[in-house]
Amino acid sequence: MTESGFRSAEDLPEGVSGHLGNLILALADNKRLLGIRYSDWLLGAPSVEAGIACSAMAQDEWGHARILYALLRDFGHDPAALEHERASGEYHSSELLDRDVASWEEFLALNFLWDTALSVQFEMLAESRYEPIHYKVRKLLEEERFHFDHGQGWTSRLLSAEGGRAALTGAFGAAWNACLCWFGPEDDPLIATLAAHGIVRRGAAGARARWLERVGPLAAETGLAREADAIWASTREPVWECYLAGRRRAAEGGPDEDSLARVRGDRNRELLMD
Amino acid sequence: MDFGAVLRETQGGRDLPPPPAFAEPAADLAERARRALYEVADPEFPISIVDLGLVRGVEGDEEAGAVTVHLTFTATACPCMDFIQWDVRERLLQLDEVGKVEIVTEWDPPWTTAAISARGRKLLRSVGVVT
């Protein structure tokens, strides 16, 4: 880092703390929900190896969520309340994670497209001037490398299988807009403020471009991305009509009842003993 | 919740190799504490957390009887984090001069197998774990 860092949320310039806390909460909620979606496939994946990978990825996501929720203490939140006491409408997770996914191709949309979208946002925080996150991101990204490899490998495999391309085209197409919107509109004041203070490396458009660079080569085979002069672009424009900037999602609602009970650990807490 | 009673019952029975033979006595509290951590086993592998490379640093305040341990973990979702931290505290509080233990978790640089000591590698090989 060339500029001096911020050692705690208290040191952040006015207006930045709220935006950063909001972004970290969105990342934490998405990680927690994504972990559940991965865990849904422990026993239903197409191969034993894929099931084991789902188990490992679920564990990673929950570990990442735990670290991020704990970090929100620095922003005045009570991590335990965030993890266990919120209603569905208070979650800042993607609509893609609101309910379980019915097919392996939908799972791959989460694994390859959505998980990568989250990782790209972490890449943007890798050299953040907010030091508490800066010092955690490298470990998170190192663990995420395997998630990308898994999603990429299975996507390639399905693209070359009979019927696989059509299935992926449908599933990826359904998830595409949520991914595009995750990074925020080009003039997103939240991200722009964070970029201006060196909290994130690039603004919304830069992060979206980075995501397209990572998923574009395979997404192109479903018609969702194209490359020109070594720059990857989406073939669809993001649709912002339903975008909720405060919750960083492109639809109303939140996790369904079953997901909410699991994400909050309601049943686990019934078993807690003093 | 205090998991202490459960942990106290579950951590016994492990065969941990003896700590290295140190030629010189420990110079200060930090070194005494670091050496004591050779007696804290990783919950999954039969080597100490020092040999596994989880201990990033130890500071001691002789006057206050306080020790600060900088720890990392192999994975962010390591299910044994609480166990390890409990064992670190438990062992260090057995030192007569220690009344307070603080644990600081560090993730940067990320842990890799390169952090395992030569002694740790040898011990792991002896139980069939190749690093």
Image (tube, coloured by chain):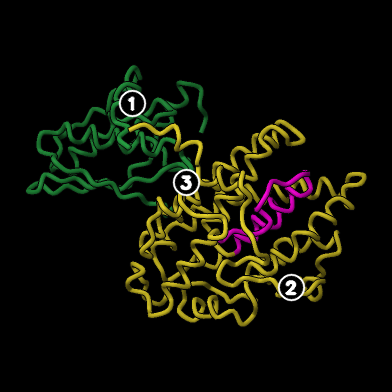
Name the kind of residue labelled 1 in the image.
Val
Residue A30 image offset from top left, x and y in percent:
58, 56
Chain of the residue where label 2 is placed in the rendered structure: A
Chain of the residue where label 3 is placed in the rendered structure: B
Query: Would residue A239 be found to the left or right of residue B118 on screen?
Result: right
Query: Would residue A109 be found to the left or right of residue A80 on screen?
Result: right
A116, A239: nearer the viewer: A239
Q: Quadrant of residue A250?
A: bottom right
Q: Is residue A42 magenta?
A: no
Which residue is the site of mark 2? Answer: A238
Label 1 secondary element: helix
Chain of the residue where label 1 is placed in the rendered structure: B
The yellow chain is A
1 and 3 marks in contact (CB < 8 Å): no
Going from N to C along the chain, the mark reached first, 1 or 3, is 1
A136 above or below A60?
below
Q: Nearer the viewer, mark 1 or mark 3?
A: 1
Question: Distance from label 2 to label 3 (Cα)?
Answer: 33 Å
Question: Distance from label 1 to label 3 (Cα)?
Answer: 23 Å
A67, B29: nearer the viewer: A67
Q: Quadrant of residue A37?
A: top right
- Quadrant that contains the C terminus of chain A: top left
Label 3 secondary element: loop
Q: Which residues are magenta?
A: A92-120
Residue that lies at the very extreme toward the right in this rendered image: A162
Which residue is the site of mark 1? Answer: B6
Q: Identify the residue at horizontal 21%, vertical 31% (top origin).
A: B22
Query: Would residue A10 be found to the left or right of residue A271 on screen?
Result: left
Which residue is the site of mark 3? Answer: B76
Badge 3: how crowded within 10 Å, few (<14), some, or many (20+)?
A: many
Badge 1: how crowded within 10 Å, few (<14), some, or many (20+)?
A: few
A76, B35: nearer the viewer: A76
